[in-house]
Image (cartoon, grey):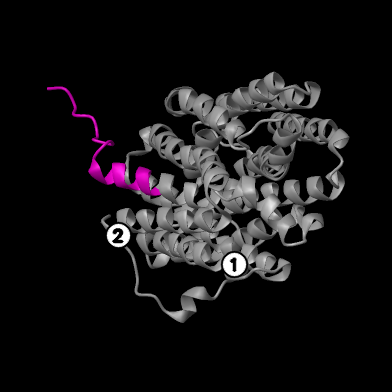
Amino acid sequence: MPIKEHPVYNIRFGFICLGSLFFSASYNMLIPELPAYLSSLGGAEYKGFIISLFTLTAGLSRPFSGKLTDTIGRKPVMVIGALVCLICGFLYPILGSVAGFLALRLFHGFSTGFSPTAFAAYVSDMVPANRWGEALGVQSLFFGTGLALGPALGSYIKLYHSFDALFYASSALALLAIVLVSKLQETHTGKQRFQWTSLRISRQDILAYEVVAPAIVMFLSYLAFGVILTLIPDWSEHLEVENKGTFFIVFTVSSLLVRIVAGRLSDRYGRVPLIYSGLGLLLLSLAVLGRFDTITGLMTGSAIYGLAMGILTPSLNAWTVDQSVPGHRGKAMATLYIALEAGIGLGALLSGWYFQNTITRMPTIFHGCAAMALLAVIYLLFRPRSHRSTQRS
């Protein structure tokens, strides 16, 4: 009698995927319009802080979200992140000064410091180890869809309505995510009641050193994403693209085409071979974006970038789960996302500082990010023996 395959795709998996989509769309739909909004408040010189402040608190909160995910459970941590998005959408129209805006960006970062860690841990609880790559690939596909379609939706709302309508729409999507997550059954069997001591963080709670290799690759890969989130709106405007979210639509479509296949291939052939191919495509996409000062070049670079991230994200997520210690999967995912936030934040801060609204500097920035992708390849080739694992690598 044939062995029945584990049922990965059920209603619970559907809820976690849709919750991921609405959550990521909630905060990312603001991205393309925030530079213009900050400029309208008189803070054009602080554009680099839009992403970097957000990622600062996201990164700082990761050790807490990792520990809470492993103690009080996956579901409460998912809700906390979405609740922050809901609150912030109502506060943006109220805090109408540069200082208030920057403070709110700092607070808003707690959202991504919490929910994504618990999303990944929840999915890995649901499915057997031999299908982690596939399942995390599908979940990240939905998260990535929100990440990319959110900006397009946000620009559309702003184009035909107002900044306030955009902010309230962000809150509405966060509320949808909360409703979906609230219907999930907790998967963490050893969950504990929340105590204030749960927020006490020791050095051992901050980083999972067993996942340092995927974390380093994640950091070097996501430097470019910080640049893209910060500067693509200005680059799109320079190229006379009406909807500043168009880049993200193309990026999403190409990413969708590869994510499920990439996850399955990483389950079969190993994580690192897939990561090499993703890094190669990342390098190529950034070279194209830096070389061609045209709409065609922008869209071609976006399509290749989507393929690259569609391969890298599920492969790095699955590699991290492979390397994680049983009972500390939340900490392992938090470590990976600390690296992600550090990459995005540093990329945004440095590119914003160097850019200074001088459009001719854009190609240099993209080529610098391509060099970081090459550095990730070199690291994988020559990483220390202690960073090597035979498990699916």
Judged from this view, the residue extending furthest toward the left is: 1
- Measuring from the top left, give residue 90's x and y in whole percent: 50, 66
Residue 14 in magenta? yes
Residue found at x 53% / y 44%: 160
Q: Position of residue 326 (x, y in %)?
A: 42, 52
10 Å neighbourhood of mark 1: few (<14), some, or many (≥20)? some
Image point (47%, 58%), residue name: 168
* Helix, strand or loop status at disc 2: helix
Asked if one can make out residue 393 in the rendered structure from this viewpoint, the answer is: no
Quadrant where the N terminus lies?
top left
Disc 2 to disc 1, how far (Cα)? Answer: 23 Å
Identify the image quadrant of the C terminus.
top right
Q: Position of residue 382 (x, y in %)?
A: 73, 32
Q: Nearer the viewer, residue 196 or 142?
A: 142
Q: Residues within 10 Å of mark 2 (few under 14, many from 20)?
A: some
Q: Measuring from the top left, give residue 388's x and y in whole percent.
A: 62, 37
User: Magenta part of the protein: which range?
Assistant: 1-19
Q: Is residue 379 left or right of residue 325?
A: right
Instruction: From the image, tell me which residue sits under label 1.
Output: 107
Mark closer to the chain start, 2 or 1: 1
Say what amino acid the circle numbered 2 marks.
Ser
**Is-magenta flag for residue 382?**
no
Q: Which residue is mark 2?
A: 182
- The residue sitting at 38% across, 45% down in the picture is 124
Q: Residue at x 63, y 41 (%)?
A: 218
Whether residue 361 is situated above or below residue 51 in the rendered picture:
above
Question: Is residue 62 among the parts visible in the rendering?
Answer: yes
Tag 1 secondary structure: helix
Q: Is residue 24 depicted above or below 83 in this figure?
A: above
